[in-house]
């Protein structure tokens, strides 16, 4: 049997829940897609793209070692020091 990674195209038969069928049918009826097969392929492709984008972005915000987190923490610390200095100046 061939590995799924080696298959460029594969026909799959599935039953769609009614709400998904109606949603995809509306896309076909509105002209967004030419037929149901294209609507399924198009929407699955969009979903996959969004998942890949989220997957790439998730690690960027996840760890204290990440550059963005470090940069935000440094900026917050800088603002905190400025406020403390201003409070000290007003007291003097």
Image: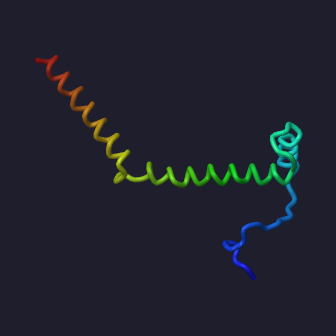
Q: Is residue 54 left or right of residue 38?
A: left
Total of numbered circles in the picture?
A: 0
**Residue 42 x/y as whole percent:** 75, 50
Q: Nearer the viewer, residue 87 or 82?
A: 82
Q: Residue 50, position in %: x, y?
A: 62, 49
Residue 23's spot in the image, x, y percent? 83, 43
- Left-right relation of 21 to 92: right
Quarter of the image where the N terminus is located: bottom right
Q: Looking at the rendering, which quadrant does residue 10 occupy?
A: bottom right
Q: Nearer the viewer, residue 79 or 91?
A: 79
Q: Is residue 16 above or below residue 78?
A: below
For image coordinates 76% across by 66% down, the residue present is: 9
Which residue is found at the position 37% from the left and 45% from the top? Answer: 68
Q: Position of residue 56 (x, y in %)?
A: 51, 54
Say if 38 sits above or below 13 in the image: above
Q: Say left or right for 52 vs 38.
A: left
Residue lying furthest left? 92
Quadrant location of the C terminus in the rendered image: top left
Residue occupying image coordinates x 83% and y 65%:
12
| x 32%, y 46%: residue | 70
Residue 12 drawn above or below residue 26? below
Q: How is the image coloured?
A: rainbow
Instruction: Give the quadrant of residue 89.
Output: top left
């Amino acid at each position: 049997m061939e590995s799924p990674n080696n298959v460029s195209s594969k026909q799959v038969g599935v039953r769609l829940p009614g709400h998904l069928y109606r949603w995809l049918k509306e896309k076909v009826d509105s002209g967004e897609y030419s037929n149901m097969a294209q609507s399924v392929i198009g929407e699955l492709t969009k979903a996959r793209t969004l998942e890949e984008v989220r997957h790439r972005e998730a690690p960027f915000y996840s760890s204290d070692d990440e550059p963005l987190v470090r940069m935000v923490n440094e900026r917050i610390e800088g603002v905190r020091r400025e406020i403390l200095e201003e409070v000290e100046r007003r007291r003097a």
